[in-house]
Image (spheres, grey):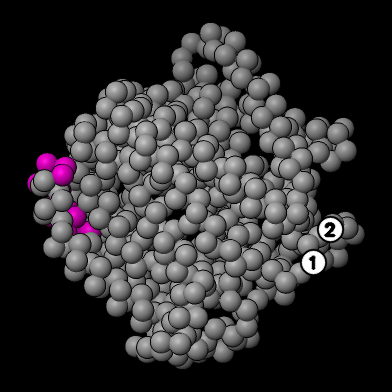
């Protein structure tokens, strides 16, 4: 592996707190760009394509996600979590990912016609699925040197690795759909996204992987990553079983409605996932051998930032969701509004649960994520099919809410035991955030009849609600002796100040 010394010399950031704060800023900047491009993509494509097009695309993407889950052996997270020099493991990780992704793609290529034709009764999804399966090999071929960006919390360079490709996906899909409005516009954008990420992975970071196999090194990495691979497979099942059942029971058109509802509902979770995977996980891996007090501070900080990210979006999508669906996607998609709101509640619960994953991974307890998805899958298997049969896509969405709630107590119990954190620390944050929403809700309801149109209502009341919410959090922090998540926001902002600043903040 060439230029491997960069990993040796810089595999951990010197000032973790400042690096984490800078990483969060870059993460939010990235998310803002992604959110704008995704929103534009949703708005334009929903008007150019039909629900059936999105349903066929959802079936094709299912095979890609199966392939990525199967070859996702957790070798990357294993190297991020590993202490010391990882140069000798990079080539083995790349070789393993490439070989497994190639084999998995070949197997899925053979299975596609049978599954699509017999199970979904949608033969028009066969060719889109075959084309998109090449994405699995592309992802398995990416330059593993990019792990240095995560290990050092270098979100600036990580921005250039991911954002241009993501924006190009939606631009490509829209241009294609303008000239040939069909499912192939979605296929082209998705394929372009992964192809550009593959190219960027070799342009941004020095060094090229070599084809090297070492059984001992692979086993060392897989001893940690194996649980993550099992978790990835179960996560695919728990996250896609609803779409599989909807496609089988209700057909591709209903699946198209459901797919757009999921996409819209998951917009807030994507930012939280970015913070969790790219910032919080390496932060916990760095302090895994520190004293318990330091870990407790980091857990509290991570949970507070997660709530600060999530609750303003809950406010927007729960209180103004019915308006946003029609405004963004058009009247055709109003049918999915109830399913969207159920799914958004489920996604919010999952996002808060997911905020604890960095602690579990960073301390080496990756198997707990696997157990979590087992619990969720058991509940889904019991209730998903009958609820979908009875209530359609709304029943599927409600079953996801129930499954997400059922698995949350296990995570809270394990985190409390590992980090020795008082439950009150979480409850205070959740309580303050929830009270803020509860105070805004009647104001939103009562003020709606004051406005002539829904658009004016949205443009005025949404920013006003956000401002009220921020002021409420600040006042709670000031008058209730620091209770709530606002203190963590102040800490993050102080960490971004120049070193000459006289402000003292607790270190993580």
Label 1: state its secondary structure: loop
Image depth: mark 1 or mark 2 in front: 1
For disc 1, the marked residue is 291
Residue at 22% x, 51% y is: 60
Is residue 124 rendered magenta in the image?
A: yes
Q: Is residue 366 above or below residue 273?
A: below
Residue at 25% x, 73% y is: 102
Quadrant for the N terminus, please. bottom left
- In the rendered image, residue 489, in percent from the top left (x then y), is placed at 73, 47
- In the rendered image, residue 148, in percent from the top left (x then y), is placed at 54, 76
For disc 2, the marked residue is 506
Mark 1 or 2 closer to N-term? 1
Quadrant for the C terminus, please. bottom right
Label 2: state its secondary structure: loop
Q: Is residue 375 above or below residue 111?
A: above
Give the overall secondary structure of the magenta segment.
helix
The stretch in magenta equals 119-132
């Amino acid at each position: 592996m060439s230029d491997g010394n960069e990993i040796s010399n810089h595999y951990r950031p010197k000032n973790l707190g400042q690096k984490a704060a800078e990483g969060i800023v870059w993460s939010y900047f990235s998310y803002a760009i992604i959110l704008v491009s995704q929103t534009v993509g949703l708005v334009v494509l929903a008007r150019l394509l039909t629900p059936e097009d999105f349903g066929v695309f959802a079936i094709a993407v299912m095979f890609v996600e199966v392939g990525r889950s199967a070859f996702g052996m957790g070798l990357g997270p294993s190297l991020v979590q590993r202490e010391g020099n990882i140069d000798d493991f990079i080539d083995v990780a790349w070789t393993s990912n490439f070989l497994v992704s190639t084999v998995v793609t070949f197997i899925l290529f053979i299975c596609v016609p049978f599954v699509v034709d017999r199970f979904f009764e949608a033969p028009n999804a066969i060719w889109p699925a075959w084309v998109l399966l090449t994405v699995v090999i592309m992802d398995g071929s990416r330059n593993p040197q990019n792990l240095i960006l995560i290990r050092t919390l270098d979100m600036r360079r990580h921005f250039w690795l991911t954002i241009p490709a993501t924006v190009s996906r939606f631009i490509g899909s829209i241009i294609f759909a303008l000239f040939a409005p069909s499912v192939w516009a979605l296929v082209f954008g998705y394929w372009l996204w992964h192809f550009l990420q593959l190219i960027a992975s070799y342009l941004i970071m020095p060094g090229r992987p070599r084809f090297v196999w070492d059984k001992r090194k692979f086993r060392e990495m897989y001893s940690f990553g194996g649980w993550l691979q099992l978790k990835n497979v179960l996560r695919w099942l728990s996250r896609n079983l609803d779409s599989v059942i909807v496609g089988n029971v209700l057909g591709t058109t209903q699946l198209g409605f459901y797919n757009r509802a999921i996409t819209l509902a998951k917009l807030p979770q994507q930012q939280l996932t970015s913070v969790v995977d790219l910032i919080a996980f390496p932060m916990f891996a760095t302090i895994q051998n520190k004293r318990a007090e330091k870990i407790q501070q980091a857990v509290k900080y991570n949970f507070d930032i997660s709530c600060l990210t999530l609750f303003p979006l809950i406010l927007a999508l729960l209180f103004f969701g019915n308006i946003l669906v029609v405004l963004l996607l058009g009247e055709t998609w109003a049918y999915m509004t109830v399913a969207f709101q159920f799914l958004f509640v489920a996604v919010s619960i999952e996002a808060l649960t997911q905020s604890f994953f960095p602690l579990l991974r960073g301390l080496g307890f990756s198997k707990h994520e696997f157990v979590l998805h087992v619990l969720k899958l058991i509940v889904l298997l019991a209730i998903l099919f009958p609820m979908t049969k009875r209530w359609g896509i709304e029943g599927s969405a409600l079953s996801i809410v129930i499954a997400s709630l059922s698995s949350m107590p296990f995570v809270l119990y394990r985190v409390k035991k590992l980090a020795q954190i008082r439950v009150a620390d979480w409850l205070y944050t959740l309580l303050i955030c929830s009270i803020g929403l509860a105070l805004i809700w009647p104001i939103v309801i009562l003020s709606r009849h004051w406005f002539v149109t829904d658009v004016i209502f949205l443009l005025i009341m949404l920013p006003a609600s956000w401002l009220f919410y921020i002021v409420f959090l600040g006042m709670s922090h000031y008058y209730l002796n620091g209770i709530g998540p606002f203190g963590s926001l102040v800490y993050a902002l102080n960490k971004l100040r120049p070193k000459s600043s006289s402000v003292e903040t607790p270190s993580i």
